[in-house]
Amino acid sequence: MKPIIATLLLAMGSAQAATPIAMEDQSQLKVPGTQAAVQFAPPAESQIPDNAFGQMVREGHALFVDTRRLMPEAVGNGMNCSNCHLDQGRMAFSAPLWGAYPMYPAYRRKNDKVNTFAERIQGCFQFSMNGKPPAADSPQMTALSVYSYWLSTNAPTAVEAPGRGYPEVPQPKGGYDFKRGKQVYREQCAICHGDQGEGQQVAGEYVMPPLWGKDSYNWGAGMHRINTAASFIKYNMPLGKPGSLSDQQAWDVAAWINRHERPQDPRLLEGSVEKTRLKFHANDGVNLYGQKVDGMVIGQGTTR
Amino acid sequence: MNPLSRFAISTALILAWPVAHAAEGQKIFTQGGANPAAMACLGCHGPDAKGIAAAGFPRLAGLSAGYLNKQLQDFRSGSRKQPVMEPLAKALSAQEAKAVSEYLASLPSAPASDLRRQQIATDPVSRLALYGDWDRQIPGCVQCHGPGGSGVGEHFPPLAGQPAAYLVAQLNAWRDGSRSNDPNQLMVGVAKAMTDAEITAVAEFFAHPLAQEVKP
């Protein structure tokens, strides 16, 4: 009897709960492989109309490439949008805005609701920028949305365009190795990102972004997943030499980068890394949050 | 010599070292090294080490000491081939090279123009300089060389304030292989992907920056 009553109660409590709802995550769909030719090309800068809309496109672009300096109240680390979305959000296989904008609204398991595009950008600010997201109706959010919308000119909605996201790099059979990753980092990454992942600054502004530590993305950012970082690295790094690392090297160096401390996941549950791991990280790709590496629990966070 | 005086002398040497070092660097810059073949730098690079634009002799003032010292080593090893600099670099001792590099790094230079990356570039030259051309895997120059070409750390030298002829010569040196000392071969691919016209235009862009910061 008891299960039936519970079901009835649930059904009465929420009409929606009576019928099963498909809960597959629409924002983490399998990204089309690189074998599918990129067909979409965003409009050229010269095509920005000379009107109020065009002005907003320019403002959104400025925020996108110079985020930290122009939105210090919203960005809590050393990152700009364009650090993870190369070529001003235009480049295929670099999570281009024209591949993202037409896919929203979409259900995201990350926050268990249907997200508008503005809400998706707010997620970037909360996690990748370790900051305070601007309000959905703020002028900055409008500008960023307008820029994304403009880049998506003539793109079909709700169609996964080849070139969107970062193409999946399958995990090597032997997994990943920190020691090898450290070596790849030293040889290929440190010249720009520094020996300690600290990035490089000129006159107090980051030119090359920090990859770990207090000024990098936090433990809630998608990039903290080793699989996501491996995909980004394989198809975008080193700058100007994409595809030069093997799948194994991309995974190794992604694991090395993501075994270092960074700002705490802002969703931290009751101050417990373990509870946070179980709720948010246990089924989130391949990640080290809350796991022991060399006897230390990863995911303690950094203090400013 | 008793231990105390030995201590006193070594302390005095340690304390005096930076001063002596700087003085040595300045002397090499103005008068040359101990070997007469190591001629004074200022003859070609100018009394303020800001280069001689008309001749295409580069600015050295304010460049990172690590970068300058590496170039001197690379002239010696041949990974950077330059007929004038090769014998000069070979005539300098390792210590002299280090001293003169540190002295040059300490010299003042005009700051790079505050050209930020936030403006949409509509002309092809500033587009290439600021954002690159990713269809050809060319990153924007400023993405590695810093805002306005200011230079970043010891691996990415300033482009701002360098003579256009010098910048053109370097890009061509990477293309023809006479310069191959770029760490991780980061420049060779970029240089080879650029056209002659682009090389000339981008060199002018950084030699004579016109565009200043535009508020969006």
Image (tube, coloured by chain):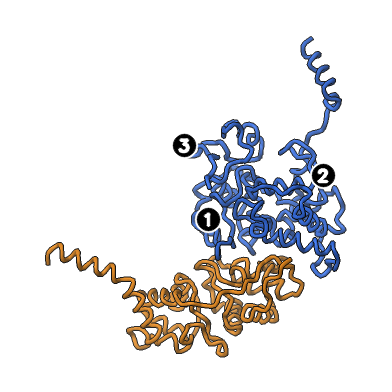
Q: Quadrant of residue A111?
A: top right
Q: Give the mark nearer the N terminus: 2 vs 1.
A: 2
Q: CA distance from mark 2 to mark 1?
A: 35 Å
Mark 2 and mark 1 on one chain: yes
Q: In the drawing, what numbered circle is on residue A295?
A: 3
Q: Residues within 10 Å of mark 1 (few under 14, many from 20)?
A: many
Q: Residue furthest left?
A: B2
Q: Which residue is mark 2?
A: A105
Q: Residue at x 81, y 20 (%)?
A: A10
* Amino acid type indicated by mark 3: Gly
User: In the image, A294: left or right of A51?
Assistant: left
Closer to the camera in the image, A49 or A28: A49
Q: Secondary structure at mark 1?
A: loop
Q: In the drawing, what numbered circle is on residue A198?
A: 1
Letter of the chain shown blue in the rendering: A
Of all chains, the one bearing label 3 is A
Residue A190 is situated, as x and y percent measured from the top left of the image, at 52, 58
- For the question of whether residue B189 can be seen, the reply is no
Residue B50 is situated, as x and y percent measured from the top left of the image, at 51, 82
Residue A283 is situated, as x and y percent measured from the top left of the image, at 66, 35
Q: Secondary structure at mark 3?
A: loop
Q: CA distance from mark 2 to mark 3?
A: 42 Å
